[in-house]
Image: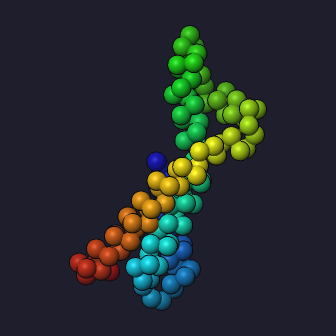
Amino acid sequence: MIPYSGTSFLAWDFLRAWFYPRKHPTRVGNLAIGAVSGMLGQTVSYPLEVVRRRLQVGGLTQPDRWVGWRETVGHVWRESGWRGFYVGLSIGYLKVVPMTAVSFAVWEEMKSLLGID
């Protein structure tokens, strides 16, 4: 969660400053920047998600011993190379990108509505 949130908030702030240095983005702008931020956050953190899932399943496939982080990463690398860390990423995009876009856009809209910004 920390790599995903950190990356998406960093991207959100950077992209807003880059594209709108002196003015506030429109609602569509907030949605677009939120979508790109979610995509970047998902892309950066997804390999950790793959390793976490493999570690959880490792206990089922090898119940007689503990499967370590290093062993899991090595196994994914040997099995599929760097692409193995991104298997299923497109499905993650379908969930995360709209969620992040809407979350950031609603956040900005509520700040504006409440006069906080």
For residue 88, side relative to residue 9 (left or right):
right
Residue shown at 44% from the left, 66% from the top: 101
Q: Residue at x 74, y 32 (%)?
A: 79
Q: Position of residue 115 (x, y in %)?
A: 25, 81
**In screen coordinates, is 21 left or right of 109?**
right
Residue 113 in which image quadrant: bottom left
Q: Residue at x 44, y 83 (%)?
A: 25
In front: 42, or 89? 89
Tell me, yes or no, if residue 74 can be seen here.
Answer: no
Q: Is residue 91 above or below residue 84?
A: below
Vertical placement of 95 versus 28: above or below?
Answer: above
**45 or 29: nearer the viewer:** 29
Residue located farthest toward the top when viewing the structure as drawn = 64
Relative to 53, does residue 35 appear above or below in the rendering?
below
One can see residue 86 in this view = yes
Res. 67 image quadrant: top right
Q: Determine the residue located farthest toward the left in the rendered image.
A: 114
Q: Position of residue 90 (x, y in %)?
A: 58, 52
Total marks shown come to 0
**Nearer to us in this view, 89 or 115:** 89
